[in-house]
Image (cartoon, grey):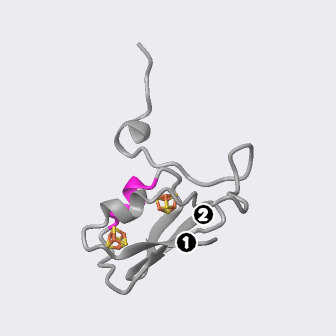
């Protein structure tokens, strides 16, 4: 039976880093924009598969260098504070 660290089991959040799966580049077609409706609940931070959005101060901020534009953050936001905006 494999052993997973405590952190992995209960806090499965990845963090952006350079490498084979590093910076997004220019292929992303939509990006998340956080509005003033954000209540800093951290749901987007917890669900983002790339670890590229987190609350700073009273609003979530996106690291666009690594964000893949998947839209998970917009879908989980309880107050619909995130809009996916076309980049093309
Ligand atoms: S669009 Fe996807 S990768 Fe980008 S911040 Fe939202 S959940 Fe993370
Ligand atoms: S899920 Fe929505 S309300 Fe919560 S921190 Fe993210 S943007 Fe803000």
Q: Is residue 45 magenta?
A: yes
Looking at mark 1, is its residue's CB closer than 8 Å to ligand 1?
Answer: no
Q: Above or below — where is 52 with respect to 88?
A: above
In terms of image quadrants, where is residue 82?
bottom left
Where the N terminus falls, by quadrant?
A: top left
Check disc 2 and report the residue beneath it: 29
Residue drawn at (34%, 76%) of the image: 81
Percent of width and height locating residue 25: 73, 60
Horizontal side of 17 relative to 46 (left or right) equals right
Horizontal side of 53 relative to 58 (left or right) equals right
C-alpha distance separating marks 1 and 2: 6 Å
- CB atoms of marks 1 and 2 within 8 Å: yes
Percent of width and height locating residue 85: 50, 73
In the image shown, does 52 or 81 lie closer to the viewer? 81
- Dot 1 or dot 2, earlier in sequence: 2
What kind of element bears circle 1?
Answer: strand
Q: Residues within 10 Å of mark 2 (few under 14, many from 20)?
A: few
Residue extending farthest bottom: 36
Percent of width and height locating residue 41: 29, 70
In terms of image quadrants, where is residue 83?
bottom left
Q: Magenta stretch?
A: 42-48
What kind of element bears circle 2?
Answer: loop
Check disc 1 and report the residue beneath it: 86
Residue drawn at (45%, 55%) of the image: 48
In the image shown, does 44 or 14 lie closer to the viewer? 44
- By secondary structure, the bulk of the magenta-drawn segment is best described as helix
In the image shown, does 14 or 25 lie closer to the viewer? 25
Q: Residues within 10 Å of mark 1 (few under 14, many from 20)?
A: few
Residue drawn at (64%, 71%) of the image: 88
Percent of width and height locating residue 29: 60, 63
Looking at mark 2, is its residue's CB closer than 8 Å to ligand 1?
Answer: no
Q: Above or below — where is 7 with respect to 42?
A: above
């Amino acid at each position: 039976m494999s052993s997973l660290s405590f952190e992995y089991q209960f806090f499965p959040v990845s963090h952006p880093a350079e490498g084979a799966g590093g910076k997004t580049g220019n292929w992303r077609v939509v990006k998340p924009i956080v509005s003033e409706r954000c209540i800093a609940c951290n749901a987007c931070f917890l669900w983002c598969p790339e670890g590229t959005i987190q609350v700073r101060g009273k609003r979530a901020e996106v690291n666009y260098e690594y964000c893949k534009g998947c839209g998970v953050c917009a879908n989980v936001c309880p107050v619909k504070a995130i809009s996916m905006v076309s980049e093309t």
